[in-house]
Amino acid sequence: TVIVAGSSGAYFQVADSIVQMDRYVPKEITKEAKAAAEDYPKLELPKEGPQKPSLDRKIRSYPALKSKGRIKIKTMGRDGVTLNHETIDLRYVEQLVDSEQLVTLGNVVKHLEENVFDGKKTLSQTIEELYKRMDSQGLGAVCDGSYLSGNLAMPRKQEIYACLNRYRKLGTARR
């Protein structure tokens, strides 16, 4: 772990090595810093390590998303996707290179909201199953209608996760 702290000696006693930046030049000052910190109260570290986050959230649909019984998708170039009035800001997902990927991501979120999110599966399970289905059936697996639009491009799993991470209405149901 690297901790960057300006004007703070609280970590000197527990640090393995201490580097000082002097006019953009790194200087190793571990011995001097530890000697200077001897007179100060020692930093108390927790006895037990941090708990891993729970990844077993069960996702349920957001019922208020449907307006007049349907979900309308609108893309904003490579900036984001709007489902009815809920905007998913994707400007900083650098891996998205064309608007066709955002059209597909909008369809993915719509499909998940309408057909998949039921509070029984975790997000990881949901995306794994969806991605396998898209891989075997093509992008038609997430699109409505009898014909497939030509303005779609397959996103990677990472982009689906990134999109859902930015979707503020992603619901959870407790076990």
Image: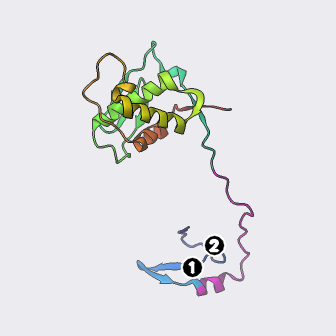
Residue 142 relative to residue 50: left or right: left
Q: Are marks 1 and 2 in contact (CB under 8 Å)?
A: no
- For this rendering, which residue is in front, 99 or 125? 125
- As helix, strand or loop, the secondary structure at mark 1 comes to loop
Tell me the quarter of the picture where residue 107 sits.
Answer: top left
Is residue 8 left or right of 28 when viewed as pictured? right
Task: From the top left corner, tell me how far across and down residue 43 is, in percent.
Answer: 70, 71
Do we see residue 82 in this rendering?
no
The residue nearer to you, when weighing 40 against 46, is 46
Q: Which residues are magenta?
A: 31-52
Is 82 situated above or below 43? above
Residue occupying the point 36% across, 43% down:
91
Q: Is residue 40 magenta?
A: yes
Label 2 belongs to which residue? Answer: 11
As drawn, 128 above or below 16: above
Q: Position of residue 120 (x, y in %)?
A: 60, 28
Q: Magenta residues: mostly which secondary structure?
A: loop
Residue at point 48%, 40% (across, down): 165
> Dot 1 corresponds to which residue?
17
Q: Amino acid at mark 2?
A: Tyr
Label number found at residue 94: none
The answer to which of 40 and 172 lies nearer the viewer is 172
Q: Quadrant of the C terminus?
A: top right
Q: Secondary structure at mark 2?
A: loop
At x 73% / y 61%, what residue is drawn? 48
Q: How is the image coloured?
A: rainbow
Q: At x 53% / y 32%, what residue is drawn?
A: 170
User: Of the residues under marks 1 and 2, which one precedes in the sequence?
Assistant: 2
